[in-house]
Amino acid sequence: MKIVEISDASSTLAEYTSDLSEEPVIITSNGQPIAALVTLENVDLETISLSTNPKFIELIQRSRQNRRTQGGIYSQEMRRRLGIKNSEE
C-alpha cells in the first residue's frame, strides 16, 4: 500500500493511478487517511453511484429490516400478483 500525504502530493492523478494494479494509494492529511485510490473490477458507474448514495443505502437498509420483521414475498407469489407467467408454463 502506498501512502501519500496530501501536502506532499506532487504527482499528477494519472501518475498515481498508473500503479494501482500493484497496490492501492492512500491519501492522508496530517497522517489521517482521507481518500483511497483503488482498482475497480466488474463495476459500472451506476453501481458506484448507488453504493455511495446515502438515500439509496437507507432505502436498502429499511427494506431489509422490513423483510426481517414482516417477512417477504416469494418470487412465484410476486409473479402471480403481477400477472406474469412462470417460464415453466
Image (cartoon, rainbow, N blue to C red):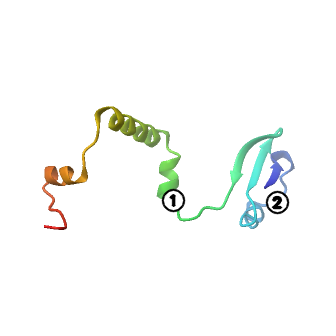
x, y percentage for residue 77? 18, 50
Distance (Cα) linking label 1 and label 2: 25 Å
Please indicate whether residue 38 sits to the left or right of residue 54 in the image. right
Name the image quarter holding residue 40. Answer: bottom right
Residue 68, above or below 5? above
Residue at 45% over, 39% down: 55
Q: Is 34 displayed left or right of 64 in the figure?
A: right
Task: Say which label, 1 or 2, has the lower sequence index.
Answer: 2
- The one nearer the camera, 81 or 17, is 81
> In the rendered image of this protein, does residue 50 appear above or below residue 41?
above
> What residue do we see at 71% from left, 67% from top?
21
Mark nearest the camera among 1 and 2 is: 1
Q: Nearer the viewer, residue 1 or 8?
A: 1
Q: Which mark is residue 31?
A: none
Residue underneath mark 2 = 11
Image coordinates for residue 47, horizontal then vertical, percent: 48, 56
Point out the image quarter for the N terminus: bottom right
Identified at 75% across, 50% down, the residue is 26
Is residue 42 depicted above or below 68 in this figure? below
Q: Secondary structure at mark 2?
A: loop
Q: Residue furthest top?
A: 69
Q: Which mark is residue 45?
A: 1
Q: Is residue 46 left or right of residue 37?
A: left
Percent from the top left, x then y, of residue 53?
Answer: 49, 44
Q: Position of residue 15 (x, y in %)?
A: 78, 65
Amino acid type at mark 2: Ser
Residue 33, compared with residue 38, is above or below; it is: above
Disc 1 residue type (three-letter): Leu
Q: Please name the residue shown 24% across and 53% down the image.
A: 75
Q: Nearer the viewer, residue 14 or 43?
A: 43
